[in-house]
Image (spheres, rainbow, N blue to C red):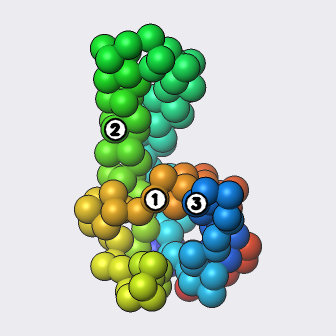
Amino acid sequence: MSKPKPIRVICDDCTVTIGEVEYHPHEDEWVEIVPGLRVGDFAEDIRLMALQAEYEAVRDDAQQGPAKALEVSQLMADFYRRSAGLIAKRLYAWNWTDDDGKPLAQPHLNEAVILSLRSEEVGYLLGVLRGNRGSDSKNG
């Protein structure tokens, strides 16, 4: 038996809302992910879910002054840094483009390109890795 091949996921359902307008910036675009979850990746994903829950529990506290606002902001910054690391490990390739239609750098082991995305796109990619996003999947 050979090694697992990346799975291609069509990203037509990736949605970004700016103001009151909903966009689908990755229509007709795809990502290829590594199937299966390594133990370290699983542990990191659990940490991400805990960070998100912690943020949701305190996000309204940001109105209680600068110190609390900084604490809430640091939680989100940590969440996105950790998300970028996990996504960059598991995404092998994509044909995603930026707002000008220019190809983005390949994501594999490239946390910087993941951090250049909007928060909705990062959330979408986490959903893809967890198996609950993407309008179509097939072996690559």
Judge whether 74 appears above or below 23 on screen. above
- Left or right? Give the position of 116 relative to 91: left
Q: Which residue is mark 2?
A: 77
What distance separates the C-alpha of mark 1 from that of mark 2? Answer: 13 Å
Mark 1 surroundings within 10 Å by alpha-carbon count, few (fewer than 14), some (14 through 19), many (20 or more): few
Specify the quadrant of the image occupied by residue 25. Answer: bottom right
- In the image, what residue occupies the spot 35% across and 71% down? 107
What residue type is disc 2 on? Answer: Ala
Q: Secondary structure at mark 1?
A: loop
Mark 2, secondary structure of its residue = helix
Q: Are marks 1 and 3 in contact (CB under 8 Å)?
A: no
Say which residue label 3 marks: 18
The nearer-to-camera label among 1 and 3 is: 3
Which label was assigned to residue 118?
1
Sequence order check: which comes first, mark 1 or mark 2?
2
Q: Amino acid at mark 3?
A: Ile
Disc nearer the start of the sequence (3/2): 3
SS class of the residue under badge 3?
Answer: strand
- Circle 2: is it few (<14), some (14-19), or many (20+) Cα within 10 Å? few
* Residue drawn 31% across the image and 67% down it: 113
Displayed quadrant of residue 108: bottom left
Residue 1 seen:
no
Query: How many numbered marks have been drawn onto this rendered protein structure?
Result: 3
Q: Label 3: few (<14), some or many (≥20) within 10 Å?
A: few
